[in-house]
Image: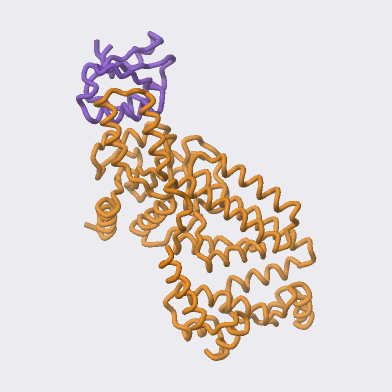
Amino acid sequence: MYLKQAINSVAFFKAIDCCQGEVLLHTKEKDVLNLRSQLCRFVFAVALSEGSLFADARVECSDPSDYLLLQDYLTA
Amino acid sequence: MEHKEIRIDTLREILLKVYGVYTTVCTRDTFTPVDINAPRREALQALLYMDADFRKTADGKPFDREKQYFYCNTLGMIWLFSIDDTRAYIIGPAFTDNYSMLDILDQLDSRNLSGPLKMEMREFIRQIPVISSHRMQQYGMMLHCCLTGSTLTIQQVVILNDTPRPMPEGPGSATISTNYMLEKKLWKAVREGNLDYRKELENTMANVTAGYVSDGNYLRQDKNLAIAQVTLACRAAMEGGLSPEIAYPLSDQYIRRIEACRNVSEVSEICLGVLEDYIHRVRQAKLRSGVSAQICECCDYISMHPEENPDIQKLAQKYGYTPYYFSKKFKQEVGMSLREFTTREKIERAKVLLTQSSLTVSDISEMLGFNSQSYFGSNFRKLTGLTPTEFQIGLDAAVKNDNVRG
């Protein structure tokens, strides 16, 4: 699943807090951010505000049921 | 535009253009940003909200417009805010020490981020100012004054942490300064077990700036100052009658706790607990050592109001004694007469006024209730060995010498 553009990162983090498993973000530049980590959230928030860094970024949930919780922020 | 809005806008402009500090105006109810005067607004907003929901107090009570709130996230960034009827005004973020900033950069380096992301992060982090907690407190005082027109006292400061925990009773955050005269007043309060020390602490907070006692690391700076405070409080408490068997182990315990602190908020909380703890213990020791509660109370009152010339008739009547017996009891327990004690307190206050205010010797003499300036001068010289003017000049010279050396 891919990350939608122009999402609200604060709301996205809240949704991730409800997830059961790990939530990883893979970027085109081969960066991998674990979005449960505060430091990675910091990187995510900063990079998201820049815009182009997360174009075509892929989100991977270790627990498949978590995709449902994040559906507002993801696209196929 | 209302006067208050003009004051707030001016403060925000100054903080941004002079100090590089960002501010945010939010709605009071939901903390939805209305105006952020910073680049990368979305990122700054996310930073503020990503750790924990600071938008409620630890005890669940609504925010109080008479108070000011400090919030520190797990990455070592700090914000402070105050509210009015409709808005919340946030100052920050800022790093309180270089160490936090460098630590984040190190952590990012260890994650092997790609070139563009690493550059982006470095650029962003460098836009966040490094400001000591003491300086943040001063900005907070300015904000409170703009909103309410009144001075912020330390009892009005609340520290919100990412991990909820019970707030200490009494005063909020404080950094102990190295200002000699005000420090002396503070340690005097500890020696005397005077619970009204908060006034001196507020005075210290509002008027002085601590020297640098670390190499650019503000957490270390606050820890060093806190350890110095514990050491001095311990010595003052022993001079006040607290047993060394109690005072020294207590000091060791506090220093260990300070060393274990992860951020400046934790250090500040411990600092306030130290003073309260030692003062209570000294007070208890005094009560046990033969100084009666009435005399303690009487001394506290005189210390707080040295400008009043105590009326022995009224004091004796208040405590149910004859004037003769009260005088005798006072001298027996305190070791000096009521008049001598009052004069000593007046002179102590005069020392502070001479060095911390623009009042003339004549003004101070009159303010402290001396019958004449010459009588004030002779009492001052008797207790300090200097005339008020010599004292003032001597201190000025010492300050100038220090500045030259620094």
Q: Is residue B29 above or below residue A73?
A: below
Q: Residue at x 61, y 82 (%)?
A: B309
Q: How is the image coloured?
A: by chain
Along the line of sight, the residue nearer the viewer: B316 or A14: A14
The image quarter containing residue B343 is bottom right
Q: Residue at x 37, y 12 (%)?
A: A61
The image quarter containing residue B231 is bottom right
Along the line of sight, the residue nearer the viewer: B144 or B215: B215
> Quadrant location of the C terminus of chain B?
bottom left
Q: Is residue B368 above or below residue B75?
A: below
Residue B166: x percent and y percent?
Answer: 56, 41
Residue B240: x percent and y percent?
Answer: 70, 63
Q: Is residue A69 above or below residue B147?
A: above
Picture colour for chain B: orange
Residue B161: x percent and y percent?
Answer: 48, 39
> How many numbered callouts?
0
The chain letter of the purple chain reads A
Q: Residue at x 25, y 18 (%)?
A: A29
